[in-house]
Amino acid sequence: PEHSLDGSKVNPYVIAATVASAQPQAPNADIMPHTVVDGVLRTGMPILVQNVRTEMPALADRGWIGQVDKRVSLIAVPVQVNRSDRQALGVLLAYRIWDLDIRVKLDDDLGFLMMVGTLVGHSLRMKKLVAEDRERLIRESNDLRKALDEVATVTASALPADIVGDSPQIHDVVERLRKVAPTRSTVLLRGESGTGKELFARALHAASARADRPFVKVNCAALSETLLESELFGHEKGSFTGANAMKKGRFELADGGTLFLDEIGEISKTFQVKLLRVLQEGEFERVGGTRTLKVDIRLVAATNRNLEEAVATDAFRADLYYRICVVPIMLPPLRDRPGDIPLLARAFLTKFNRENGTALRMADGALDTLRNCYFPGNVRELENCVNRVAALSSGPEITAGDLACLQGSCLSSQVWCTPTRGPGVAAMGATAGRLPVLNQPPLCGAAGADRSASPPCQPAAAVQPQMPTAATAAAAAADPAATLGPREALVDAMERSGWVQAKAARLLGMTPRQIGYALRKHNVEIKKF
């Protein structure tokens, strides 16, 4: 390659040693002759000039050499890693001024400079390798940081290990849990029975700063008021018959951790006052004790009751409601996220296989059938269904024909369809109150069933009004609404309830979902106030 060497710009790997200047400066052509430097760089071989004055007179005439009355020799060697390598990294150039008393040989100077050039080459090579390694490490560090950020993003969007689902509803719930987990705020998990409220409560605890502290749960509906007080607050020895020793309550056991109160809507108003004090002040006394105890807990409550209605009817204290309903999180029913049913079914079957040492698998047809089911009992009912069909399976694969709903043995309709009362039911011809015949497969197994439009155990086809009978005529005398047609009865109930579907459902003895279905069926426009 061409190397431009003038007085102001030299190769950065050229090292010059000279007596011509005591201060560091860029060597000019008088010190670094272009022909010599180019020859060394081009060939990678040393150049030796024994007498510069006679062999390079042009250099001697215009430079400092002409001012020296002694013989001057020039030695230029390549700076390279290996002597066998013809590629030079730079040039090491030196002048020898001969005195009469110098007893050295020019070959010795050449050998010495060759050795120095090799050492300098190794040093430059190591410097280059270090620089390359540093750049590589910087790149790898940046790549690793980006990868960690991506993993953190994916992890943040992923679900906890025990929560199965890929629906937007589940992701929304998990996102709300993640937002509230680092705080001390009380969380109220709401939803129908079987939606997994305890599972989400544990996920909230695991994502909080209290994860390494106790998670204590209490089912408020499973205990009487007296037992619940002793269970939560503990008791002193001799405080009541059978209290043979002091017992710590769940509040003490959960100190520093999370206390999960399930079915909190079932506690009595008397006990609500006692619970409110603990939540407000963080202090209580054991049953039969006088010493006030203080605890630091994070409360997570759960209920499937309509607490707002309970507050309105004075069945639940408003001050306790606002104390526990700081961050309400609604858990979606399984019927609102049918896409999660196959994922849940596979997860339950995997759990069954692990516990029973089997290797069952579920056919796509069976998963499609389950996906069309209504599952009023939500995830708990789905798990029951999967465990039952797995236990009774006679082959390695579970098919749609193995499911109870297609064999006429599914009892879900009998469990969830109870007789309903109310004039609107008869007027609208609703069949939700009629128990189906046991050997008649429920709607959930029917092909093409419309999940969104049909309430549980009610045919998807349009329901025809019933013919008036003597009984309905007698009812009409007592209640004029009984003589109305289906649409008129629906509108009448909505008018009397202020167009609140939940209230209209109670008036007609129906569910809010049935009311919504009827409104769509009869094309009734909802009035908004």
Image (tube, rainbow, N blue to C red):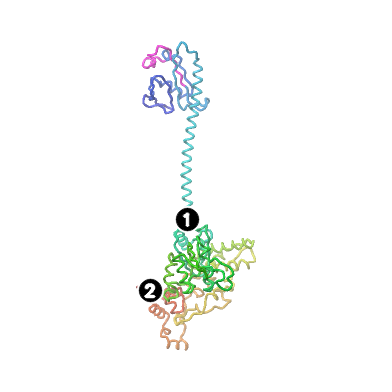
Q: Which label sits in the foreground, 2 or 1?
A: 1
- Write the residue at 44% across / 20% down: 94
The residue type indicated by label 1 comes to Ala
Task: Judge whether residue 501 is colored magenta.
Answer: no
> Tag 2: Cα neighbours inside 10 Å, few (<14), some, or many (≥20)?
few
State whether residue 317 appears in this view.
yes
Task: Judge whether residue 64 is colored magenta.
Answer: yes
Residue at the outermost front position: 290
For label 1, the SS is: helix
Report x, y in % for residue 384. Answer: 57, 68
Question: On the image, numbered disc 2 is attached to which residue?
Answer: 526
Report x, y in % for residue 89. Answer: 46, 28
- Write the residue at 60% across / 65% down: 398
Q: Are marks 2 and 1 in contact (CB under 8 Å)?
A: no
Task: Point out which mark residue 156 bears.
Answer: 1
Task: Point out which mark residue 522 bears.
Answer: none
State whether residue 334 appears in this view.
no
Q: Nearer the viewer, residue 398 or 305?
A: 305
User: The N terminus appears in which quarter of the rendering?
Assistant: top left
Q: Earlier in the sequence, mark 2 or mark 1?
A: 1
Q: Is residue 157 above or below residue 88?
A: below
User: The C terminus appears in which quarter of the rendering?
Assistant: bottom left
